[in-house]
Image (cartoon, rainbow, N blue to C red):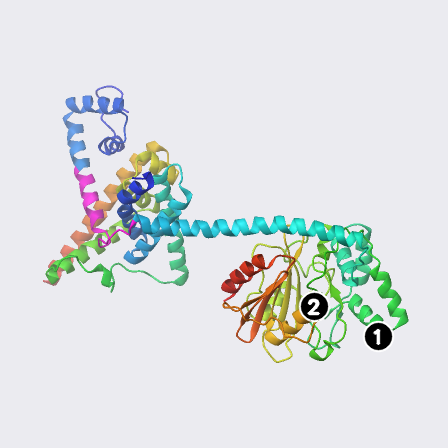
């Protein structure tokens, strides 16, 4: 199997996830991921894995700018038939899943752009040197950034959760 | 890193350790510290839990699983795209080299035959050539003559007016025209004017009259490179030209042209049929120095213009009998678009022109 093909098979899903967490639109994330890999096959760069995520990040940024220009806010999981769960789940399970997803998205939104980027790149499977290269951070700073990003994400999520719990308690 | 047994492991290093981002020696150092430090072990466990939670939270932010498109499909699409891009480059390089060869051939031929450039050539040469010629040019082009007396034509120049007067037999003006005809700069080459654009687009009833023509590519034989899209800044130095902005206003849309080539001149002729988009001729410079002209306008106007250049007004041109609506030959190619025609004239073989017009037609739509 060609090296690029191997990379495609192992990384495509991560690239879609990475893009999805930036554009919040499953179809668009797929489209952009395919664009990324088509460019990869055309350019065949030296360090393909890091290259793929760098291009993905750039495309996502362009997408965000375009979205701002259009003043069109893409919201999480709204009316997207493609978002249907793969199995038939009880309605309350689906609602719960969607609520949790929205909560995590909100929590992620409280992070700085840099922290988000590093966290998402790490989660996409990039190494510290690859993250450093893409973000311009020193390798030593990647650990610091990740430490802060993880803590903030979890703290923000927990805070939101406890707020929600208090809200529910107050209503009941 | 840890200096001495008493110093605890910094948080970021524990993250890096758990992320397997440290060297083997760093790991050994950390592990030996952890073996003797219950506080750091607790910290490590807490960071490991934080790390797991982060991963779990992020895992909820995933789009639904879908089938991964086949590698073959994507790589094939990428290959097709690469081929398209390479094709453009090849066509460009091929056209450029061909133009060079053709230009040299024609240049040599015209020098052999002592071919005199048309008046417009001399004037254009002055307008683009620095040195003494500039004075002559500024003298004659400082005040472009508005064409209120020539309905349908945007701008005319003093030269044009003089030349027209000469055609009518005015001796005084005729002398002036002859003076203009004498090139003030050496004419290196004046390529064969197979497809000549008249100074002014003729009215239908004037088509039987001889049309003053400018050999395609002659302007560039001076070697002068015009700054792209700087039409209005030179105070009429480029006569018979409408400004870029004016051209766009008149057209109310993008000006038809070949992307990536410097625009030398935009000629505009109002449509006689009341069409909101007038006939437009955009002259651009190829890398070889030759001129390529993009003509777009009402079908009858363009047909007449092109037919007049062939010196044959009897038969309609182009016949548009091609499957894709593209017709023409070496030197010119056109495509019909409803009641309008888009055409290119350049000293290029029909294959190149056909490819160019097809691309232009697609991008213009």
In the picture of the structure, the residue carrying the numbered disc 2 is B309
Q: Is residue B210 magenta?
A: no
Viewer-nearest residue: B302 or B44: B302
Q: CA distance from mark 2 to mark 1?
A: 21 Å
Residue found 21% across the figure and 54% down from its top: A101
- Residues B238 and B105: in front is B105
Query: In the picture, residue B190 is in which quadrant?
Result: bottom right
Q: Residue at x 86, y 61 (%)?
A: B179
SS category of the residue bearing label 1:
helix
Vertical placement of A98 versus B203: above or below?
above
Numbered label tally: 2
The image quadrant of residue B8 is: top left
- Tell me the residue at 72%/76% (across/down): B207
User: Which is nearer the eye, B348 or B264?
Assistant: B348
Q: Which residue is mark 1?
A: B168
For mark 1, name the chain. Answer: B
Image side of residue B150 versus residue B47, left or right? right
Q: Is residue B68 magenta?
A: yes
Can I make out residue B224 in this image?
A: no
> Which span is picked out in magenta?
B49-70
Q: Are marks 2 and 1 on the same chain?
A: yes
Viewer-closest of B83 and B267:
B83
């Amino acid at each position: 199997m060609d090296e690029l093909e191997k990379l495609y098979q192992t990384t495509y899903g991560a690239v879609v996830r990475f893009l999805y967490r930036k554009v919040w639109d499953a179809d668009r994330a797929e489209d952009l991921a395919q664009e990324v890999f088509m460019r990869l096959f055309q350019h065949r760069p030296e360090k393909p894995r890091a290259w793929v995520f760098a291009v993905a990040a750039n495309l996502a940024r362009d997408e965000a700018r375009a979205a701002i220009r259009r003043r069109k806010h893409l919201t999480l999981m709204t009316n997207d038939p493609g978002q249907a769960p793969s199995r038939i789940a009880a309605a309350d399970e689906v609602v719960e899943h969607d609520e949790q997803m929205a909560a995590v998205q909100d929590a992620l939104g409280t992070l700085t752009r840099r922290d988000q980027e590093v966290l998402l790149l790490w989660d996409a499977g990039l190494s510290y040197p690859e993250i450093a290269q893409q973000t311009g951070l020193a390798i030593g700073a990647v650990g610091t950034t990740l430490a802060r990003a993880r803590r903030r994400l979890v703290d923000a999520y927990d805070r939101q959760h406890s707020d929600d719990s208090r809200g529910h308690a107050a209503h009941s | 890193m840890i200096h001495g047994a008493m110093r605890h492991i910094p948080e970021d290093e524990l993250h890096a350790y758990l992320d397997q981002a440290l060297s083997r020696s760093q790991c050994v150092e950390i592990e030996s510290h952890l073996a003797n430090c219950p506080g750091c072990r607790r910290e490590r466990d807490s960071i490991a839990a934080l790390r797991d939670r982060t991963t779990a939270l992020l895992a909820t932010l995933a789009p639904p699983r879908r089938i991964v498109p086949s590698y073959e499909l994507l790589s094939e699409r990428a290959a097709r795209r690469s081929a398209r891009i390479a094709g453009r480059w090849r066509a460009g390089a091929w056209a450029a080299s061909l133009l060079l060869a053709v230009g040299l051939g024609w240049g040599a031929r015209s020098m052999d035959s002592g071919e005199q450039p048309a008046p417009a050539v001399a004037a254009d040469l002055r307008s683009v050539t620095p040195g003494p010629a500039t004075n002559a040019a500024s003298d004659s082009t400082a005040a472009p003559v508005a064409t209120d007396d020539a309905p349908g034509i945007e701008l005319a120049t003093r030269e044009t007016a003089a030349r027209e007067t000469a055609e009518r037999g005015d001796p005084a003006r005729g002398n002036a025209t002859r003076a203009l005809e004498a090139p003030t700069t050496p004419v290196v080459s004046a390529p064969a004017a197979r497809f000549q654009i008249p100074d002014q687009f003729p009215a239908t009833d004037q088509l039987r009259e001889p049309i003053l023509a400018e050999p395609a590519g002659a302007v560039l034989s001076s070697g002068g490179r015009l700054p792209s899209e700087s039409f209005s800044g030179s105070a009429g130095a480029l006569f018979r030209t409408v400004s870029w902005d004016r051209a766009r206003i008149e057209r109310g849309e993008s000006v038809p042209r070949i992307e990536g080539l410097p625009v030398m001149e935009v000629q505009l002729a109002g449509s006689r049929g009341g069409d909101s988009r007038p006939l437009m001729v955009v002259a651009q410079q190829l890398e070889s120095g030759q001129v390529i002209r993009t003509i777009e306008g009402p079908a009858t106007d363009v047909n007449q213009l092109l037919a007049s250049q062939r010196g044959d007004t009897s038969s309609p041109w182009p016949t548009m009998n091609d499957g894709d609506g593209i017709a023409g030959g070496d030197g010119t190619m056109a495509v019909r678009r409803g009641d309008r025609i888009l055409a290119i004239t350049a000293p290029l073989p029909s294959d190149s022109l056909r490819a160019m017009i097809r691309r232009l037609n697609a991008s213009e739509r």
